[in-house]
Image: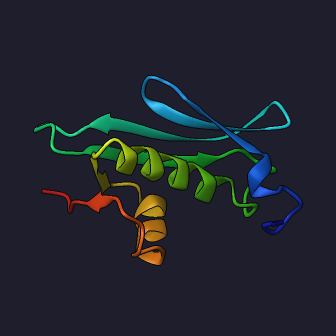
Amino acid sequence: MATGGGVVVSDVEIVEDEHAWMARVDGHAAGELVWRESRDGSAVVLVHTQVAEGFEGQGVGGALVRAAVDRLAADGRAVRPDCPFARAWLQRHPDHPVTVLDRT
């Protein structure tokens, strides 16, 4: 399934780091989604999604958010999307099983 400019979403490798999910395409850093724990521990806060130059508009950001919320849903964690991109992705996918909390 091509997503715009030649990158196939299934070709996006997602790597979990201590405070980010990182995307790689053909071994190249393609983007990252930075996260942190909420102050009260009730959710994982999605802070910022960034896609590297040359990978914009190719589904990398969406692949990052999907990987993050899939993992969080599987772990029974709630998510708070402070990142506008992640918030918009979740609004476009209201049937995703992750629990979404509003900023408080």
91 with respect to 13 (left or right): left
Residue in the foreground of this view, choosing between 84 and 73: 73
- Whether residue 68 appears in this view of the structure is yes
46 with respect to 8 (left or right): left
59 up-or-down from 69: above or below: below
Quarter of the rendering containing residue 3: bottom right
**Quadrant of the snapshot with the C terminus:** bottom left
- Whether residue 55 appears in this view of the structure is no
Residue in the foreground of this view, choosing between 49 and 71: 71
Residue furthest out toward the top: 18
Residue 76 x, y percent position in the rendering:
28, 46
83 up-or-down from 39: above or below: below
| Residue found 58% across the figure and 47% down from its top | 50
Residue furthest out toward the right: 6
Residue 97 x, y percent position in the rendering:
36, 63
Quarter of the rendering containing residue 12: top right
